[in-house]
Amino acid sequence: MKIMRNKIITVRLTEEELAFLKTKAEESSMKMEPLIRALIGGQRFQKCPQEEKRRLLRQLSGISNNLSQIFRCADLHDPGMAEMKGEIEALQTKILKKAKEL
């Protein structure tokens, strides 16, 4: 069901407040209206990752996917790979932890 937003409020801001809001919207890659709604709803926002962070996140994601593929392939050829599965899951957990730190 689509949310109907038909209530309008007018807010007066100083030049500094408007500049701050615009900066936060740009940093979070959001338009100002969704950003304000998110803040009202108590959501946190964060800066959009810079290109280097995006590149690292893509690499971490690729590594995690490769680990999953390795396990699936090994499991097909040797169903007794339970120990390896535990190690792969531990590595994936470490990867996710590092990705969250970025």
Image: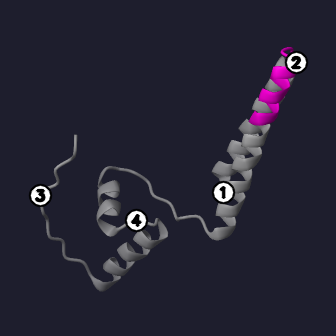
Please name the amino acid that badge 4 sits on. Answer: Met
Q: Do residues under tags 2 and 3 come within 8 Å of each other at their CB atoms?
A: no
Residue identified by numbered label 3:
7
Residue identified by numbered label 2:
78
Q: Earlier in the sequence, mark 2 or mark 1?
A: 2
Q: Is residue 67 above or below residue 75?
A: below
Residue bounds of the magenta highlight: 68-80
Residue identified by numbered label 1:
102
Please name the amino acid that badge 1 sits on. Answer: Leu
Q: Earlier in the sequence, mark 4 or mark 3?
A: 3
Label 2 CA crowd tier, 10 Å (few <14, some 14–19, many 20+): few
Q: Nearer the viewer, residue 51 or 81?
A: 81
Q: Does the magenta stretch include residue 71?
A: yes
Q: Please give the count of numbered marks on the rendered protein.
A: 4
Q: Earlier in the sequence, mark 2 or mark 4?
A: 4
Q: Is residue 74 above or below residue 20?
A: above
| Direction from residue 101 to residue 25 in the image, left or right | left
Q: Is residue 77 above or below residue 50?
A: above
Please name the amino acid that badge 2 sits on. Answer: Asp
Q: Which residue is drawn at 18% across and 71% down?
A: 11
Q: Which of marks 2 and 3 is nearer the N terminus?
A: 3
Q: Which of 6 and 40 is in front in this view?
A: 6
Q: In which quarter of the image is the N terminus?
A: top left
Q: Is residue 32 magenta?
A: no
Dot 2: element? loop
Q: Which residue is drawn at 81% across and 21% down?
A: 76
Q: Residue at x 72, y 41 (%)?
A: 65
